[in-house]
Image (tube, rainbow, N blue to C red):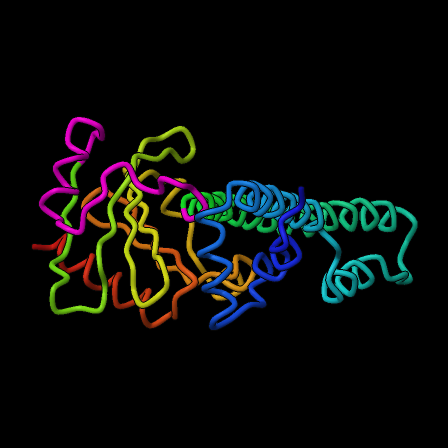
Amino acid sequence: MTCDWVPKLDLYMDGELSGGELTEVETHLRSCPTCAAEALSRLQLKRMTQAAGHRFSPSPEFRQKIAQSVTVVRRPRWAWRWAAALAAAAAVVLMLVPASVWLQRSRSEQALAELADLHVSTLASANPVDVLSSDRHTVKPWFQGKLPFTFNLPELQTSPFRLIGGRLTYFQQSPGAQLLFEVGKHQISVFIFQNRAELSRLNSGSSLNRQLAFNTETWTKGGLWYFVLSDASALDVRALSELLKSADGS
């Protein structure tokens, strides 16, 4: 039997819902396993489609450089052979540079999209957290012995944020913590992993945020890598990030 909410899932995946409709869909996803599974399936299909569509195509500047490199110029025949070889070598170099940049960007986008999938699947789960508590002194000790690192949580009594709880998660075969916070009617995921070189290169830019339909913040500190993600406003995401940074420095 098809749920009446299914037609709205594509609008939700594309970030085209706002206000009351967005809240209604998020609430329904947490209570309907069928729609939750369908939303996750559609999100994964969307990510794969985006990855398949990101193919390298020469820019106008690239085409102009190639045209200039192969322009016919009067020269001796012996010079022509060398010029042709140099032009071919230049073309290869010009192709490799943008291709390598595209490859790095594609890997970054795919990795961050995986975290977005974890956030969505968590919200859609009937049991989104393993330790349910708004007390930081309960949530933080729960991770001891489960992770090879520790972290601090901020005091939230004077802030608009509320800690919902946390769960153990895995990203790129490494264990980490996923903390769930609430602000207004929005949930914010905070992912914490041991910092590695490949994680430090994952930066959340504005163009990537539009693709993910989320606001994000990321930073490294004390050997840890933090990633904050939510459909809450950019100001709320940044404010919670600053609280986390202050707690980590205390």
- Left or right, residue 223 beside residue 216: left
Query: Is 136 contained in the magenta span?
Result: yes
Task: From this view, report whether residue 101 is shown above or below residue 148.
Answer: below
Q: Residue visible at 48% across and 54% down?
A: 28
Q: Where is residue 16 in the image (x, y as percent from the top left)?
A: 58, 67
Q: Which of 124 and 51 is in front in this view?
A: 124
Q: Residue visible at 62% across and 49% down?
A: 3
Query: Is 126 contained in the magenta span?
Result: yes
- Left or right, residue 225 beside residue 213: left
Q: Nearer the viewer, residue 2 or 248?
A: 2
Q: Count every numbered label the image shows and give the total.
A: 0
- Left or right, residue 205 beside residue 96: left
For the record, the magenta segment spans 123-149
Quarter the C terminus occupies: bottom left
Quarter the N terminus occupies: top right
Q: Position of residue 29 (x, y in %)?
A: 49, 50
Name of the residue lying farthest toward the front: 1
Q: Residue visible at 52% across and 61% down?
A: 213
Task: From this view, report whether residue 150 is shown above or below residue 24.
Answer: above
Q: Position of residue 222 (x, y in %)?
A: 18, 46
Q: Nearer the viewer, residue 103 or 132?
A: 132
Q: Where is residue 65 in the image (x, y as percent from the top left)?
A: 75, 62
Residue 245 occupies quadrant:
bottom left
Q: Residue visible at 56% across and 46% down?
A: 35
